[in-house]
Amino acid sequence: MKLSINRELLIKAINMVVKAADKRHRFPILANIKLVLDEQFLTLTATDLELELTTRFAIPAGACIQSGATTLPAEMFFNICKSLSEDLVVIDAPDETSRCVITSGKGRYTLSVLPAQDFPSIGMAAVSTAIKIAQGDLIGLIHHTRFAMATQDVRQYLTGMLFDMNDNKLTAVATDGHRLAVAHRLLGESYQANKVIIPGKAVAELERLLLELAKTTEDSNVVELGFDDEFLQVGLALQDEETGTALQVSLSARLIAGKFPDYQRVLPTNNDKVASFNKDEAMDVLRRISVLNSKENPGVLLNFDGTDLCKVGVTNKAHGEAEEVLNVGYRGDGIELTFNEAYLRAVLNVLDGEICLEMNQPSSPALIYQVGDDLHQYVVMPMRL
C-alpha cells in the first residue's frame, strides 16, 4: 500500500484508535495498528482482544497511490507522525517487504511491519439490545461514576461499570468495595430490563470519544449503544475541524461476565444524622489539611458534636497533625468517623453547591449527594482504625 495524506488528519485518525493497542505485548501484532487503504477510504484499527477501536474516513482523490493493507507499531507510528514538521505524509509499505517507509519533507523513517492478514478481530456484537441516549447524558453518567471503579481486583466485575437498563431509565454504577457511585438518566423511550458490565478501559475510551464528539456536536446528539450477551458496540461520527473530514469511529468491547453487587441494597436508608455543607468550602479544607496525609495515613477525621461546626482533622504520626473547622448544618446526635480523604474528595469533585452527608454509626456506610439532585448518589465506607 502507498498513501499520501494530510499529517493533521492522520494524527487525528490515529489518536482515535491508538489507546486500544495492547501495551503489554502479549502478542507482537496487538501492539500494532492495522491500516487498510482503498481508492476512497482509509481504515485504522487497534485492539487488545478485549477492546477494539476502528476509524474510517474518506480520502481525497489521488491520495491512494496503491491500495493494500499493513500493520505498524502503534506508539512509534503515532509519535513519528506527531514529530513531523511538514503537512504532507507519504506512507509506503510494499506488499513484498516487511518494511514501511514514512516520508515527510526531508524526513525519512523506516518501520518494521507485520502482515495485515494476521491481525485479529474480537468480533462484532449481534445486537439484541440497542438503546438511544443523548450524548450529554451519556457523558454525565460516565463522568459521575467512573472514578469509583476498581483499577485492579481479583473480582473482575469491580473493574468495570454496570449499565442497568430498566424501562425508560439507564443507571450507571461503579464500586471498588470501599465506595459506590450511582447515576441515573431518563431515556426517550422504554427498553426491556437488562444489565451489562462494561470494562474500565472501554468506559474510559468511550468517554474520551464522546468528549471529542462534543467539540463539534450538541449535547442533545443521540448516541446508540448496542449490546448482546458478549459485546458492547458503539458507532460515532466525528468531524475533524481543520480539514472538515468526517471520521466514522466504532468501539467494540467484550463485556465482563459476572454478577455485579446489588447496589440498591448498599444504599443506606436508616441514617439518622445529617450534615449539609458547601462543596467549595469543604474542598478547600480538605486540600489544606491533606498536606499531612500520606499513603500510610490517608484518613481524615470528621467530628460532628451536634452543633453547626464540624472539626476536620488529620493525624500523621511521623509529621504531626492538622485541624480545621467547617461550617455545617447539622441534625442528630454527635458522631465521629474517619474517611479516606482521597475517596471523599473524589466524590465532592463531581458535585456542586450544597452537599448532604447522611450517617448512622462510625463504621456504617455514609450517603453523600447534592441537595436537590436525585440523579446522583454516593456511598463511602468509613475507615476502620
Image: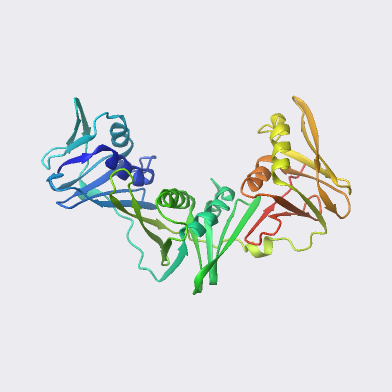
Instruction: From the viewer's side, name the closer residue of 3 and 173.
Output: 3
Instruction: From the viewer's side, name the closer residue of 282 and 14.
Output: 282
- The image quadrant where one finds the N terminus is top left
The image shows residue 113 at horizontal and vertical percentages of 21, 38
Left or right for 15, reference 155: left
The image shows residue 367 at horizontal and vertical percentages of 72, 55
Residue appearing at x 20%, y 48% in the figure: 59
Left or right for 52, reference 363: left
Left or right for 91, reference 362: left
Residue appearing at x 56%, y 53% in the figure: 158
Colour option used: rainbow
Left or right for 38, reference 359: left
The answer, for residue 327, to whether it is visible in the render is yes
Position of 360 relative to 309 (above/below): below
The image shows residue 177 at horizontal and vertical percentages of 63, 52
Instruction: From the viewer's side, name the closer residue of 280 and 110.
Output: 280
The quadrant in which residue 231 appears is bottom left
Q: How many marks?
A: 0
The image shows residue 370 at horizontal and vertical percentages of 69, 54
The answer, for residue 157, to whether it is visible in the render is no
Instruction: From the viewer's side, name the closer residue of 312 and 88.
Output: 88
The quadrant in which residue 89 appears is top left
Residue appearing at x 69%, y 35% in the figure: 287
- The image quadrant where one finds the C terminus is top right
